Image (tube, rainbow, N blue to C red):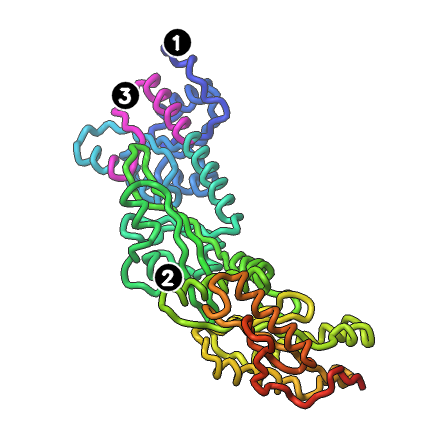
Amino acid sequence: MSAVTFNIDLAGLELLLVEDNATSALFISRVLLKAGARVVTAHDGIDGFRKFQELRPPIVITDINMPGMSGLELVGKIKALDTDTQVIATSAIRETDCLVSAISLGFSDYFIKPVEIEKLLVAIKRCSEINAVKRQLESEREKFRTVLECLNEGIAIKDLNYRIQYQNKAMIQLFGDRIGAACYEIFGLNEPCADCPTVKVLLDGEPHTGYREYRHNGKTLHIESTASQLKDSFGVVTGTIEKFRDISERIKNEKIIRDMAFHDALTGLSNRRLFEDRLEQAIAKACRYGTKFGLLYMDLDHFKLVNDTYGHETGDQLLLESAERIRLCCKRDLDTISRLGGDEFCIIFADCGDREQLTIIARELLNQFIQPFRLENNVIEMTVSIGISIFPDNGTVMKELEIAADRAMYAAKKSGRNTFRFWEPYSNSMTMADAKVVQPPMPHLR
């Protein structure tokens, strides 16, 4: 035996040797044991398959020609149980058909008897290394699968035809089991949309993000997805991987933040920031189309007395009810109702600059406050004073219109409250418009 034999270390390696020739079996097993391997022998194919089922060794060395069950039959059964088992064949037959059968069954190596023991040991060592690499790969795959399954984001791996080959747990929770389905079918489409991240990434190779709505069981989810290319070891694009996130909660929170930024926290009406933006828009539109619009300021009369008498909680309830009554008079979506602070409200009447129309609206607002406010155990009678300016009659910029409406409102208060005024800068007396409603000048608190 060559010294090369002793340079190959098979320490701890488990093998199954299936050999019907007792002499060959003894010789090969002794060599393997001396190299450090743990060897189990079987005298034929039937015995070999039984021992494989019991022990599941990673490497099998088998003769091809054996009575009862041939080596080819044995390997066919072994591969049916475990495709990763490494098999080395030995045979005295040099027939081509036998070699072809061995290749098709997935033999790792094939030796013609008498076997060169050094080459056999090298082949066994190579099989051991292959198994080690496979175990490492499987370990990495398992880590990868564990990571993917632990993610809160849905992951889908797709082929070049957009068909889903793999999906993690979060993906199944979002969309159900979609293996084999095209990704666009999830969103009820018959083909990819033009804005699809997967389409874009296959065109230019760069990651792309898209936003879509997913409707299921009466609910609408807002889905954000990012797609990237998948390549094999040769750099060839084999498909895509796409990450899906349900951002419905984020959309909801963003809306809350926007509402907080642009709406009054108490009444839900537009705040000053949104009011000024809408007023600028109304001015720009009126300038573009040569139209008019009205700006109305209104202030609750003697509101401080309510706060002082009943407290700020009751005052807040009164402001809420006031906002609802104002809404009843302004049902058009294009009008903007705002609470500027305290007990001061304003309304932008888009495309409504006719004095007659604005007079009708002002009277409706005054009449809304005729009914007493019933707040818990309290009944409060409240009136309002209203000032009106018109674009472009009373100003062509925001500040001018605001000042005009504000001055008109204070003119209404000065004349006894519970009425409205248009701004008339060139008249010694404001236009009364016969607006006064018969109400006490101070709120009755009962």
Q: Where does label 1 land, which residue?
A: 3
Rendered-image quadrant of the C terminus: bottom right
Q: Where does label 3 land, which residue?
A: 114
Distance from disc 2 to disc 1, alpha carbons, whole Å, reads 65 Å
Does residue 164 sit above or below 359 in this rendering? above
The three-letter amino acid code for the residue at tag 1 is Ala
Q: Which residue appears at 52% of the width and 51% of the height? A: 152
Asked where in the image residue 189 lies, by quadrant, the reply is: bottom left
In the rendered structure, does residue 179 fall within the stretch colored magenta? Answer: no
Q: Which residue appears at 43% of the width and 13% of the height? A: 6
Q: Position of residue 193 (x, y in %)?
A: 30, 58
In the image as oriented, which residue stretches furthest toward the top?
Answer: 3
Crowd tier of the residue under label 1, counting other residues whose Cα lies within 10 Å: few below 14, some 14–19, many 20 or above: few
Asked where in the image residue 314 lies, by quadrant, the reply is: bottom right
120 or 274, which is in the foreground? Answer: 274
The region drawn magenta spans 103-131
Q: Where does label 2 land, which residue?
A: 186
Mark yes or no: residue 150 visible. Answer: yes
Q: Position of residue 238 (x, y in %)?
A: 30, 42
Q: Earlier in the sequence, mark 2 or mark 3?
A: 3
Does residue 153 sit above or below 437 in this rendering? above
Please name which of the two marks, 2 or 1, marks the residue nearer to the observer.
2
